[in-house]
Amino acid sequence: MKIAITGASRGLGFELAAAAAMRGHTVYAGIRNMGDASRYGELDPQVRDRIIPIELNVASRESIASFAGVLASREETLDGIVNNAAILLGREDGIESLDPDALSASLTTNLVGPVLIAQALMPLLRGAKMPSILNISSEAGAYASVYAGDYPYGLSKSALTYFTEKLRMELGPQGFQVLAIHPGWIRTDMGGEQAPGDPSATASSIIGLLERARPLQVKRGFVDARGQELPI
């Protein structure tokens, strides 16, 4: 398989790239700072050689267009996208201290970025036999588990899950797998060292969803890393 992963230089994104490459897939790793690609040097050479780092800032339309152009120059088809890049701002702010710039930046990166990535790469996905679009969302954006505060992240992830479901309604009948995934609380820069979840194991489960090893029996496309449906 040929897979594009955004935010792939650290945290869950790095683990996703490594997990996919270890399973023999070609990974186009979108990273904002190309200097961060040095971390792939930690991997076994056979794994590392399957990861192609490409500069990508999902908050920039020009960068997204450039990323899509590079992929189109190398491949005729793409099997899957994992929209993983995200930012976490203003967690502790209540409504009176909420910074509108933090809200705007979060919506741009966490929602608009995935929308534009899916749009830009659609021509390549349409050439695949079983294309997938997986958006890394969060329970923080689920109405069923709403909590106070965390406005920028929660609102942006809620919108991402809703976008994913709308996209699923459009593309599902055309053979696409479209899912919003809550990866759980995992040990990454964003999740913190106190988190109980193993990012490597989570990444492996998510790549398994891309591989479509088994059909998912879900009414809605908001799932955990194993494909179990979650309340929205």
Image (spheres, rainbow, N blue to C red):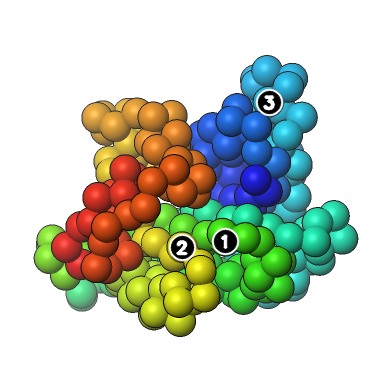
Nearer to us in this view, 114 or 22: 22
Which residue in the structure is indicated by mark 2? 177
Indicate which disc, 3 or 1, sits on the residue closer to the N terminus. Answer: 3
Q: Are marks 2 and 1 in contact (CB under 8 Å)?
A: yes
Q: Amino acid at mark 1?
A: Pro
Indicate which disc, 2 or 1, sits on the residue closer to the N terminus. Answer: 1
Nearer to us in this view, 30 or 106: 30
Which residue in the structure is indicated by mark 3? 47
Q: Position of residue 83 (x, y in %)?
A: 52, 58
**Image quarter in which the C terminus is found:** bottom left
Vertical placement of 160 versus 51: above or below?
A: below
Q: Is residue 152 visible?
A: no
How crowded pointer 3 is (Cα within 10 Å; few <14, some 14-19, many 20+) is rated as many
> How far is disc 2 from disc 3 in space, using C-alphas?
26 Å
Which residue in the structure is indicated by mark 1? 131
- Secondary structure at badge 3 equals helix
Q: Amino acid at mark 3?
A: Val
Indicate which disc, 2 or 3, sits on the residue closer to the N terminus. Answer: 3
* Image-based side of 174 in relation to 52, left or right: left
**Image quarter in which the N terminus is found:** top right
Q: Residue furthest right?
A: 73
Instruction: Say which residue appears at 66% left-offset and 61% top-offset.
Output: 128
* Image-based side of 67 in relation to 100, left or right: right
* Image-based side of 65 in relation to 153, left or right: right
